Image (spheres, coloured by chain):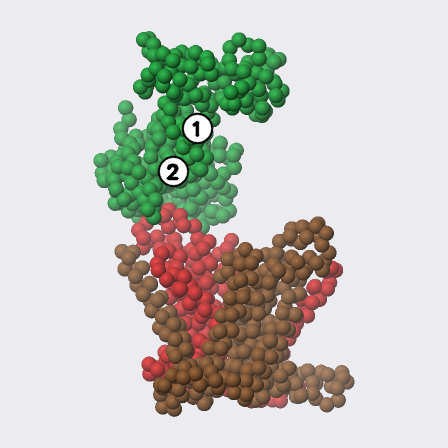
Amino acid sequence: MKQTLLSLSDLSKQFDGKTVLDSLDLEILDGEFITLLGPSGCGKTTLLRLMAGFEHPDQGTITLSGQDLTHTPPERRPLNTVFQNYALFPHMSVFDNVAYGLKMEKRPKDEIRQRVNAALAMVQLDDYARRKPHQLSGGQQQRVAIARAVIKRPKMLLLDEPLSALDYKLRRTMQVELKRLQRELGITFVFVTHDQEEALSMSDRVVVLKDGRIQQLGTPREVYERPANLFTAQFVGEANFFAGCVDAVNGDDTITVDVFGLKRTFRKPDFQVFEGQPLHVLLRPEDIRVLAPDDEDGVAGRVVERNYKGSTLDSVIHLDDGTEVLASEFFDEDDPAFDYRLGEPVKVSWVDGWEWLLPQEAAKAEKEALADA
Amino acid sequence: MSRWLPRTYLTLVYMLLYVPIMVLVVFSFNESRTGYEWGGFSLRWYEALFNNRAMVQAMWNSLWLALSAATVSTVIGALTALALHRYRFRGKRVLNGMLFVVMMSPEIVLAISLLGLFLLVGLQLGYVSLLLAHVTFCLPFVVITVMARLNGFDEALPEAARDLGASDFIMTRTVLLPVIMPALLAGWLLGFTLSLDDVVVSTFVSGPSYEILPLRIYSMVRVGLKPEVNALGTLLLVFSLVMLMLSQWILLRSKR
Amino acid sequence: MQQPFRTAVLVLVWGWLLLLVLAPNLLVVGASVMTRDSATFISLPLNLDAYRQLFNPLYLDVFLHSLYMAAMTTLVCLLIGYPFAWALSKVPKQRQMLLIFLLIVPFWTNSLVRTYALKLILATNGLLNNALMSLGVIDTPMQMLYTEGAVIIGLVYLLLPFMILPLYAVFDGLREDLLRASHDLGAGRLSTFIHVIVPLTLPGVLAGIMLVLLPAMGLFFVPDILGGSRNLLVGNVIKNQFLDARNWPFGAAASIMLTLAMAFLMLAHRLSKRRIGEDGV
């Protein structure tokens, strides 16, 4: 089991009377890649700035390996930051930028030169030491910023949406590179992003934040497949929610749920269930199967939209009771009936066992909050 | 529109702007005393200038005044710009407005108000009154120059420096100052030139104890033509031009 | 550690501005409603005599004449400057830098010296008269110096860059696609000019007027050098009243009139910018 490196307890922060962080607790483990994910205004950047020491909490403590850091100024914290727009010093060369942290520690010149060169080699920028930041591309600047931040061998690296300024392809490359770096250096990475795809593909654990509170903390898989609430389910990936009602609680750890008049048997969820209880059946678009209209299984509807996505075919199906369903199916070359025309009647079903149950909550309010974000 | 018409027009206006200056420069090397006919090349007016002890004294006075006014206004102006940029405080808009009014209002309004103040508090007109007045009218220009630089300044830079272990003081020295240095230099050069060239305000707030160059020129050119003025004017023009090119060069280089 | 520094900076800045900007200006306002006194410059009782004196026919004439010359100066600057700024904004960017540089040179050079240079040209036996006579255009030298025209020429010469620079700024920011859109919608050259270009460049025009009109009433050394005793500016009156006649209330009242004119122009400029959706400075 990994040890706790940084622990945040009961952290609160307000700006101009608006609560940004609300009594938040979080334990960050040594050596993990943890991502703070959430819509803008959820408090993820503020949380990162509190860790770095650029802001001070109104309440709560921050401890690093048992040492209280809450009121330590940023220059005396053994953590470093990679800034959103890199924040490279424009008047210094790449070398001097990377060397800055070591100069602050008053290291001998030889050691500085050696370590800077090593850091630049690590990010494949050996030949660029003499350039000024403005002579580099966005991706190169990004790497300088990383080299500058890791050269002091911090206990933890804080990354504030570091890839948001890069174009899609470069972002993918940097994602892989960041993962590689994290493995090689063995440093804890705290990564802030609003991009759920990025969060899922890079992290060991994901913290989903909303309105200054943690919605869920778990592995990418847990967060995606077993979301703790409607917000997480909707924010992380696309989701279909079907209204269901508990028909029977069976003895063998299963329950029978009535969805669209179909009786389906599910594994009993973690929360309390009773007969007649309304709940949500969550299905990801890729869980959905679109069947021919004469199939005996499934719910009838019509195709109202179809988008060709390369490897998948995404469609929107309007069920007869008015529900809209998103479906995302992988191509099956052997199936001639795979493609549908708009308006074509179909039936919708899903793979048994892939559904996830959530208790009924104020669903409308959740949806509106998401739309605002 | 054809292309030669705008070009001819531009050239014509530039000629109108520059012909008098060129005439002045050429005539400063004119041997003839009358000053309207070419009497051959000569440096006699420059010689006369430097043999005139009162004139040389006025030059030194002006230089010293411009030097100190530019320096004081750069220090205060830079601090003002920093305060406006970094701090939130009450009356920020009022402060901004006051600087704007100083810059826009006719010099003569500033001049008489300062004269009134100095006489009322019994300040002897001379170096100190000139310095106070010059710093005041240079201030908004320095503030604007520095503010422009600070507005393009990435807020994350000071944080990055702190993050890498620099204290507030070290950060100011190693990041903030180097980044705004070009603006400070440009502001200083502008202040220096404004002070060196000022006639209107100086006319009011200077006293017999401290004679400065523009006022000496003023008393010379009010009546008739004085060939020495050609030489002196040429020197001042060259000096200002060098300062201007220096400041443009600094700003351009820093933009790259 | 940061708080004392902040306090020190704010005290210094506020102190300077209150003492050397606000206090003197209040003093001028105060002086304008007081009574002239030969020993202490101003004394009680309060009255509006100084303002009444402004409308004394003798001074009113001077003011109107000054206003006329300033207005002419502004008009000439606008007529020269508007097409100039337009043409300048069309020049390739590389060369524009140099041309702008040539325009701001005058801002950095001694205006007294440049006014004097004009005198060399305009004098009775100066360059222009000599040139015209040798070309046979005139037989006897014309009186050019010490005329109203000479003052206006001098003011235009000094103030033209201040008209051009704000105009250039608006022309430079004028988006080509707006003009194309106007042509595309069927407007000819003239209607595009009237309906699109003029409204969009109006803030620049007003800024230029502000930067030219007010100094054109205050630059007292221009009439002193070029204009003789009959072509006085408001600035000359203020200077004489303060330095020679020692009539502070009257000088102060005259300067307040200038300030009010400035306030009015600034307001107009602000409104014009707001109209096209830019925040006034």
Residue B187 in percent (x, y) is at 45, 65
Chain C shade in the render: brown
Q: Nearer the viewer, residue A46 or B210?
A: A46
Query: Where in the figure is residue A189, as x and y percent of width and height?
Result: 36, 34
Q: Amino acid at mark 2?
A: Cys
Estimate the x, y position of residue C271 in percent, counting from the top left.
53, 62
Q: Which tint is chain A?
A: green
From the rendered image, report the letter of the chain displayed in red.
Answer: B
Label 2: which secondary element: loop
Q: Quadrant of residue A86 in the image?
A: top left
Numbered tag placed on residue A172 in the rendering: none
Residue A363 in picture, x, y percent from top left = 41, 28
Q: How far apart are the alpha carbons under marks 2 and 1?
A: 15 Å
Confirm whether residue A183 shows in the render.
no
Left or right of C135, for residue A201: left
Q: Residue at x 67, y 50 (%)?
A: C181
B31 or A3, which lies in front?
A3
Q: Is residue A245 visible?
A: yes
Q: Which residue is mark 2?
A: A42
Q: Which residue carries the number 1 mark?
A: A234
Q: Secondary structure at mark 1?
A: helix
Report in which chain the residue with disc 2 lies.
Answer: A
